[in-house]
C-alpha cells in the first residue's frame, strides 16, 4: 500500500513539474530582466483581502526543491483541552492521522503571545531571544518594545535567535509568513520571501481569516523553484474571545469551533495540492479565568523611582531594587517576588535586563499590575480571561500541539513537552541544519517516521 501510494504521488509530482516547467522558464527569463515582483504576480489565486509583501530572495535551491513542505498554524490562546472539550472534529481527526499532545504542550514563561511565538520559531527561551513579554522596557537601550506598536514590532534589532523562516531562507529555501509575530521584521539580513503585514483592524475578519488559507494554497501552486516549503500562519482567535468573555463562555467556545472549521478547510485544500505537506496545528498558550480584582503593586511598595510595564519593574538604583524586593516579599500570597538573579531556574527568567528587577511571579491566575489608573479616571476590571502564568502552577496555560503528514508517524500521543523542542523537530522535517537552540530533537524524535536520524544511518541509535 505504502509503495503504491508513493509511486502515485511521484507520478502526480512529475506531471505538475512538467506543467510548471514552461512557467518556470518564463519566470527565470523575467528575473534576468530584473523584475522583482515576478513571483508574487505569478501566484494565481491570491485572495485580495490580504496583500502579501514579496521579497526576492532568489529561487529554491535544487536541494530545497526536494524537501517536503511544512505548514504551521497557530491558533492564539487555543488551550490544550479545547479540542477535546468542543469535540473539534477536524483537529481530532488530524491527531488520529498523526501525533497529538492530549495533555498539552508547555509554553515558555511568560505564557504570552509574542514571547512564545518567537520561542516556537527559534527554539530558545524568551530571555534568550529577547522578547520577554508582549511589552517591556530595555534599560540598556532606554527604550520600550510593545507588540502593539508596529514600529517596534517591525524593528529587527529587538529579536535574537534565528527564526525558522530565516534559517530556511539562509539555506536556500523559500518561506511565507501570514501574520506570524516578528515576521515583518528584517532579522539577520533576511525577511520571509512572502509576508503579510499585521493589521489589528482586519486580521480577525472572516475574509482575512479565509485569505490566509487561499494565499497559502496559491503560493503552493507556484512552480517548484518558487514555492515556499515553510508556511507559517497565526490566528488571533480564540484568544480575543477568551480574554473578553472568559475561557468557558459560549462565545469563546463558538470561536474554538470556528477555528476547528478553518483547520478542516485548510487540511482539505492542502491535501488537494498533492504535495507532501506536514501540517502542524498548535497554540502559544492557554487561557485561565481570573478574579475580577486587580492586584496593584504600588499599594504595597513605593515605586516612584521605577519604570514599570504591566507588572514588570525596572528599579533605577540597587538600593531601590532591594527596598522594593523587601517591601513586596511578604505582601501577598497571590504573588512571589525575587531578585532577578534568584528567579527559579525552571522559569528561565533570570538573566535579561528586560525582565526587570525585582521580578514578580503570580502564584495563580491573578491580574497584577504595577500601578492603577490615575485618580479620577474610571478603572476597568481585568478581563475575565488571561494568560502569562507559569504553566507548572497554572495548568490552564498549557497549549495545543497536533501534527500529521508524510514525516510523522500515525496515531501517536506525546506527554507534555516544552515548546523549545519544536524547533529542532521542524528543522529536521525541512532538512535544515538548526541554529543553536535550547531544545533537543530527542523529545519528539519518536514522532518522526525516520526516528530523527540522518538518512542512511540507523534511526534506532
Ligand atoms: Zn492573549
Image (spheres, rainbow, N blue to C red):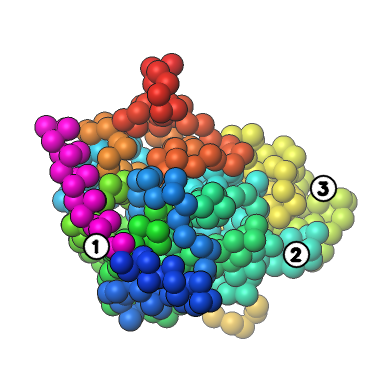
Q: Within 8 Å: ligand 1 and the Cβ of disc 1?
A: no
Q: Which residues are magenta?
A: 1-21
- The reply, left or right, for residue 215 in relation to residue 322 is left
Dividing the image into 4 quarters, which one contains the N terminus? top left
Residue occupying the point 51% across, 31% down: 440
Distance between the Cα atoms at labels 1 and 3? 69 Å
Q: Dot 3 corresponds to which residue?
A: 322
* Sequence-first disc among 1 and 3: 1
Q: Dot 1 corresponds to which residue?
A: 19
Q: Tell whether position 48 is magenta.
A: no
Residue occupying the point 59% across, 66% down: 185
Mark 2, mark 1: which one is toward the viewer?
Answer: 1
Circle 1/circle 3 CB separation < 8 Å: no
Residue occupying the point 61% across, 83% down: 376
Coordinates of residue 430 in the picture (x, y in percent): 42, 44
Circle 2/circle 1 CB separation < 8 Å: no
Where residue 307 is drawn, which disc sits there? 2
Circle 3/circle 2 CB separation < 8 Å: no
Coordinates of residue 191 in the picture (x, y in percent): 56, 64
* Sequence-first disc among 3 and 2: 2
Amino acid at each position: 500500500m505504502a509503495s503504491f501510494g508513493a509511486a502515485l504521488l511521484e507520478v502526480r509530482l512529475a506531471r505538475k513539474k512538467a506543467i510548471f516547467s514552461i512557467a518556470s522558464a518564463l519566470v527565470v527569463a523575467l528575473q534576468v530582466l530584473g523584475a522583482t515582483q515576478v513571483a508574487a504576480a505569478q501566484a494565481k489565486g491570491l485572495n485580495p483581502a490580504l496583500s502579501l509583501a514579496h521579497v526576492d530572495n532568489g529561487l529554491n535551491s535544487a536541494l530545497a526543491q526536494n524537501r517536503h513542505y511544512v505548514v504551521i498554524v497557530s491558533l492564539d490562546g487555543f488551550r490544550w483541552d479545547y479540542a477535546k472539550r468542543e469535540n473539534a472534529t477536524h483537529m481530532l481527526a488530524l491527531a488520529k492521522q498523526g501525533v497529538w499532545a492530549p495533555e498539552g504542550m508547555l509554553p515558555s514563561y511568560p505564557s504570552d503571545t509574542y514571547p512564545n511565538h518567537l520561542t516556537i520559531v527559534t527554539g530558545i527561551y524568551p530571555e534568550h531571544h529577547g522578547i520577554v513579554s508582549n511589552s517591556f522596557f530595555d534599560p540598556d537601550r532606554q527604550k520600550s518594545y510593545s507588540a502593539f506598536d508596529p514600529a517596534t514590532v517591525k524593528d529587527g534589532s529587538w529579536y535574537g535567535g534565528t527564526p525558522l523562516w530565516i534559517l530556511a531562507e539562509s539555506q536556500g529555501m523559500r518561506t511565507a509568513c501570514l501574520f506570524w509575530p516578528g515576521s515583518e521584521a528584517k532579522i539577520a539580513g533576511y525577511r520571509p520571501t512572502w509576508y503579510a503585514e499585521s493589521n489589528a483592524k482586519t486580521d480577525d475578519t472572516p475574509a482575512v481569516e479565509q485569505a490566509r488559507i487561499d494565499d497559502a494554497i496559491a503560493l503552493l501552486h507556484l512552480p517548484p523553484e518558487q514555492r515556499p516549503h515553510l508556511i507559517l500562519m497565526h490566528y488571533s482567535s480564540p484568544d480575543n474571545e477568551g480574554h473578553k468573555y472568559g475561557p468557558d463562555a459560549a462565545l469563546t467556545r463558538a470561536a474554538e469551533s470556528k477555528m476547528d472549521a478553518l483547520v478542516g478547510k485548510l487540511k482539505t485544500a492542502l491535501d488537494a495540492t498533492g504535495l507532501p505537506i506536514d501540517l502542524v496545528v498548535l497554540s502559544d498558550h492557554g487561557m485561565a479565568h481570573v478574579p475580577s480584582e486587580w492586584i496593584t503593586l504600588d499599594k504595597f511598595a513605593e515605586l516612584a523611582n521605577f519604570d514599570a510595564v504591566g507588572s514588570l519593574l525596572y528599579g533605577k538604583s540597587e538600593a531601590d531594587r532591594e527596598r522594593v524586593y523587601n517591601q513586596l516579599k511578604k505582601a501577598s500570597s497571590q504573588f512571589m517576588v525575587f531578585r532577578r538573579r534568584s528567579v527559579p531556574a525552571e522559569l528561565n527568567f533570570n538573566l535579561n535586563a528586560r525582565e526587570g528587577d525585582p521580578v514578580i511571579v503570580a502564584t495563580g491566575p491573578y491580574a497584577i499590575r504595577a500601578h492603577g489608573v490615575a485618580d479620577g479616571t474610571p478603572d476597568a476590571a481585568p478581563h475575565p480571561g488571561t494568560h502569562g502564568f507559569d504553566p507548572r502552577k497554572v495548568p490552564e496555560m498549557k497549549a495545543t500541539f497536533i501534527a500529521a503528514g508524510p514525516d510523522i508517524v500515525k496515531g501517536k500521543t506525546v506527554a507534555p513537552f516544552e515548546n523549545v523542542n519544536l524547533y529542532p523537530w521542524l528543522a529536521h522535517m525541512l532538512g535544515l541544519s538548526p541554529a543553536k537552540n535550547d531544545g533537543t530533537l530527542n523529545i519528539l524524535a519518536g514522532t518522526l517516521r525516520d526516528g530523527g536520524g540522518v538518512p542512511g544511518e540507523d534511526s534506532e541509535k
